[in-house]
Image (tube, rainbow, N blue to C red):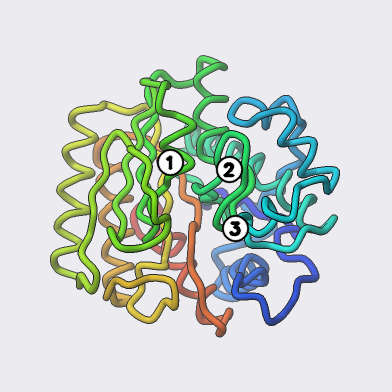
């Protein structure tokens, strides 16, 4: 079965080459999936631009306007971590719509993959850690308000805690937020998710995979979600410059396979976002992000 893949050319725009954020990885990911035959014209979908009303499901109207118009303070831009530009605005107002589109397709097909997303450090009224609008929170709240789901599980396996997601959704009991992350990594001041699993620096494959598998099994049984939003961050990789864990490429593959298979076997629709991943070799990084899509084909295809 062709799996819906959501992406947009605006995700990778003209960006300073020396910046630590790998902005070209989104285009390179799509190109790699095309080269191995998983992304085709028939299963590649392009989201539109999100309206401000849509973004306001999880964000302050004044903050949205100030970002889009280039009126953030210098301090706010430093906390964001990315230089403001019209290209940044364009990609930022498209990406949350991409996650929502992927969620809709997952509800209909059982699986869909957004080749971006996972901006889990974005808070209600400020940007942080390369994240501006929180696509996971926006998508969950939008689906709930539309009556398409009654319970959403956000299963966040990025190496950094999903602090923005936790804070935006702390008074939304219909969304269960789970973050499994390195305890000694960004952000320094953690939020409180519905479930936080703190991992020791240097944790390797076996311990990590057991925690991920056991935690998801318990949450599916306890929460009975109608949809899983899976942040498949690859910054858990041993050589990721912002990671601090010791997970191999095979460990990432086994992780993604396990998460996707558990969702499939439980009959719970699941959609993936790529989350964090940092590497000067952006082609290698794109192949790392592609693992979730490859395993989606293995499990669902």
Residue at (85, 55) in percent of width and height: 86
Residue 99's tag is 2
> For mark 3, what is the residue?
130
Residue 299 seen in the current view: yes
Q: Is the residue under label 3 in contact with that under label 1 (CB below 8 Å)?
A: no
Q: Residue at x 51, y 50 (%)?
A: 118
Foreground mark, 2 or 3, reads 3
Mark 1 crowdedness (10 Å alpha carbons): few <14, some 14-19, many ≥20 = many
Is tag 1's residue or tag 2's residue first in the polypeptide sequence?
2
User: What separation in Å lies between label 2 and label 3 (alpha carbons)?
Assistant: 17 Å
Q: Position of residue 11 (x, y in %)?
A: 70, 59
Q: Which residue is mark 1?
A: 229
Up-down: is 301 above or below 13? above
- Whether the residues at callouts 2 and 3 have beta carbons within 8 Å, the answer is no
CA distance for labels 1 and 3: 20 Å
- Who comes first in sequence, dot 1 or dot 3? 3
Q: Identify which residue, 187 or 44, lies in the foreground.
A: 187
Task: Determine whether, in the image, residue 223 is placed left or right of residue 289.
Answer: left
Image quadrant for the C terminus?
Answer: bottom left
Cα–Cα gap, marks 1 and 2 = 9 Å
Please state the horizontal and vertical placement of residue 13, each as a whole percent of the image: 77, 66
């Amino acid at each position: 079965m062709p799996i819906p893949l959501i992406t947009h050319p605006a995700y990778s725009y003209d960006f300073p080459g020396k910046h630590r954020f790998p902005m070209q990885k989104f285009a390179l990911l799509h190109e790699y999936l095309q080269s191995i035959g998983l992304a085709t014209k028939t299963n590649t979908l392009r989201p539109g631009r999100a309206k401000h009303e849509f973004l306001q499901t999880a964000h302050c109207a004044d903050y949205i306007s100030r970002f889009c118009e280039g009126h953030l303070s210098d301090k706010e831009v430093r906390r964001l971590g990315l230089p403001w530009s019209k290209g940044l605005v364009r990609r930022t107002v498209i990406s949350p719509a991409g996650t929502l589109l992927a969620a809709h397709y997952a509800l209909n097909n059982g699986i869909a993959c957004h080749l971006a997303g996972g901006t889990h450090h974005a808070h209600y009224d400020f940007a942080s850690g390369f994240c501006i609008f929180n696509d996971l929170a926006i998508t969950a709240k939008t689906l709930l308000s539309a009556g398409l789901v009654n319970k959403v599980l956000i299963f966040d396996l990025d190496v950094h805690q999903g602090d923005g997601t936790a804070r935006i959704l702390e008074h939304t009991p219909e969304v269960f937020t789970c973050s499994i992350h390195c305890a000694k990594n960004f952000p320094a001041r953690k939020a409180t998710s519905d479930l936080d699993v703190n991992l020791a620096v240097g944790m390797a494959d076996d311990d990590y995979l057991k925690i991920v598998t056991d935690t998801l099994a318990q949450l599916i049984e306890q929460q009975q979600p109608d949809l899983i939003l899976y942040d498949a961050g690859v910054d858990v990789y041993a050589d990721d410059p912002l990671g601090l864990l010791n997970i191999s490429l095979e460990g990432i593959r086994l992780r993604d396979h396990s998460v996707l298979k558990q969702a499939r076997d439980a009959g719970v629709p699941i959609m993936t976002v790529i989350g964090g991943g940092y590497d000067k070799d952006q082609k290698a990084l794109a192949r790392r992000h592609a693992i979730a899509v490859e395993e989606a084909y293995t499990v669902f295809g």
